[in-house]
């Protein structure tokens, strides 16, 4: 391991060029305007825990407006960016991910999303005019992707044969939904390019919430883990969204839909900018496998609230298997 560090504890691993176990097979692409896409969504989440969506209804303008605001923010001087505050867990973070010793070649802004739009006073570290432009781009984008997450969750319920269409979607559309939003910037690193190496941008992990909706610029680096443990590189597509199941969806479906492990490797040639909406349920929401899906099967997880899970998740390291703490001992 080579170390890029400010202090001895800040270590970001450099990964030697593509190992043999990296695959380049196809990821599922789902056209939301096509009949039958609800079945394809379920199949993709069973097989990969992940898919790309096209014909998603979010305008290019909304995506590029927010990307431009994010690029503007990340281009500020370090002193200006540090005014956005230490992430606890929300705020501006640089290399340090979470509070338990994880680091990556990334800087980010993390926001808590509740029923109210983000107010420009929460971006008070920016000049008034910039804060209001950034804020309106953020709110416009978040409201569109929340709608997209709700459409996908309704299709998922339909694909699983559940009568109550809003069984999942109501969790993210509720006034009390505890969701998050993140803007990540993986800076270019010319030295890495010369060394022909990859650096961990965002280490491997699963997302704790129900569903994550990711959009990035056209820079590669995103990978998902396959069932056999190999990594699949996902070619970027700035016009589409990438959707992955989170831990809570895995529990609600008693393990049928996979919360997929993923990571970002950077090769330093071009900066990557990504924006991710993490759709979470209300804090007091009881999380338990849905009886409609059990059909005589034993529950694989104990009952817990999202607040219990979130607390445990935010105490864990990025790569930890957070769900293991909530698994039930099976009787047979
Ligand atoms: C190391 C951590 C960062 C994280 C909180 C955690 O303790 C474990 C889960 C991490 C994660 C992954 C998905 C999202 O990016 C995130 C915001 C989340 O909800 O869980 C991050 C957390 C974070 O960056 O604080
Ligand atoms: O930045 C990316 O492309 C993915 C980051 C990610 O997985 C996360 O923020 O949870
Ligand atoms: Fe993630």
Image (tube, rainbow, N blue to C red):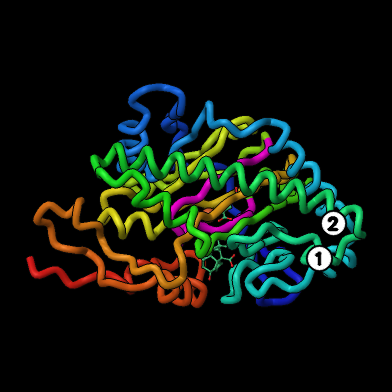
Count of all numbered marks drawn on residues in the image: 2
Residue 260 in view (yes/no): no
Q: Is residue 200 magenta?
A: yes
Q: Residue at x 64, y 41 (%)?
A: 216
User: Where is residue 270 shown, x and y percent of the image?
Assistant: 74, 40
SS label for mark 2: helix
Ligand 1 closer than 8 Å to the CB at disc 1? no
Q: Taking 48 as reference, is 223 left or right?
A: right
User: On screen, 117 above or below 150?
Assistant: below
User: Where is residue 28 shown, x and y percent of the image?
Assistant: 41, 31
Q: Residue at x 53, y 31 (%)?
A: 56
Return the residue at label 2: 131
Q: Taking 186 as reference, is 120 left or right?
A: right
Residue 133 in view (yes/no): yes
SS label for mark 1: helix
Is label 2 in contact with label 1 (beta carbons under 8 Å)? yes
Can you say which quadrant of the picture contains the N terminus? bottom right
Can you say which quadrant of the picture contains the C terminus? bottom left
User: On screen, 217 above or below 93?
Assistant: above
Q: Taking 238 as reference, is 39 left or right?
A: left
User: Where is residue 157 shown, x and y percent of the image?
Assistant: 32, 43
Q: Residues within 10 Å of mark 2 (few under 14, many from 20)?
A: many
In this orientation, which residue lies closer to the viewer: 134 or 14?
Answer: 134
- The circle drawn on residue 285 is none
Q: Is residue 303 magenta?
A: no
Q: Which residues are magenta?
A: 199-217
In this orientation, which residue lies closer to the viewer: 90 or 224?
Answer: 90
Return the residue at label 1: 121
Q: Residue at x 62, y 56 (%)?
A: 181
Distance in Å between CA atoms under marks 2 and 1: 8 Å
């Amino acid at each position: 391991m080579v170390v890029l560090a400010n202090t001895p504890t800040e270590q970001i691993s450099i990964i030697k060029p593509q190992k043999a176990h990296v695959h380049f097979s196809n990821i599922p692409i789902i056209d939301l305007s096509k009949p039958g896409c609800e079945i394809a969504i379920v199949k993709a989440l069973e097989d990969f825990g992940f898919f790309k969506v096209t014909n998603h209804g979010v305008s290019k303008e909304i995506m590029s407006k927010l990307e431009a605001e994010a690029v503007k923010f990340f281009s500020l001087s370090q002193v200006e960016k540090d005014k956005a505050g230490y992430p606890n867990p929300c705020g501006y973070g640089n290399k340090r991910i979470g509070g338990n010793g994880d680091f990556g070649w990334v800087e980010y802004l993390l926001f808590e999303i509740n029923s109210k739009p983000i107010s420009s006073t929460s971006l008070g570290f920016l000049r008034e005019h910039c804060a209001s432009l950034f804020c309106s781009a953020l709110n416009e984008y978040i409201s569109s992707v929340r709608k997209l997450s709700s459409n996908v969750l309704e299709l998922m319920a339909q694909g699983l044969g559940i009568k109550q269409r809003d069984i999942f979607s109501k969790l993210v559309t509720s006034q009390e939904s505890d969701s998050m939003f993140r803007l990540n910037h993986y800076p270019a690193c010319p030295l890495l390019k010369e060394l022909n190496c990859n650096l961990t941008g965002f280490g491997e992990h699963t997302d704790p919430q129900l569903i994550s909706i990711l959009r990035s610029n056209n820079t590669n680096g995103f990978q998902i883990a396959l069932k056999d443990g190999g990594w699949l590189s996902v070619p970027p597509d700035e016009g589409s969204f990438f959707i992955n199941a989170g831990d809570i969806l895995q529990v609600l479906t008693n393990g049928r839909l996979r919360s997929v492990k993923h990571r970002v490797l950077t090769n330093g040639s071009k900066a990557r900018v990504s924006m991710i909406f993490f759709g979470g349920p209300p804090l007091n929401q009881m999380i338990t496998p849905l009886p409609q899906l059990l059909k005589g099967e034993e529950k694989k997880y104990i009952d817990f609230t999202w607040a219990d899970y979130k607390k445990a998740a935010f105490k864990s390291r990025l790569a930890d298997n957070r769900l293991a703490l909530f698994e039930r001992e099976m009787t047979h």
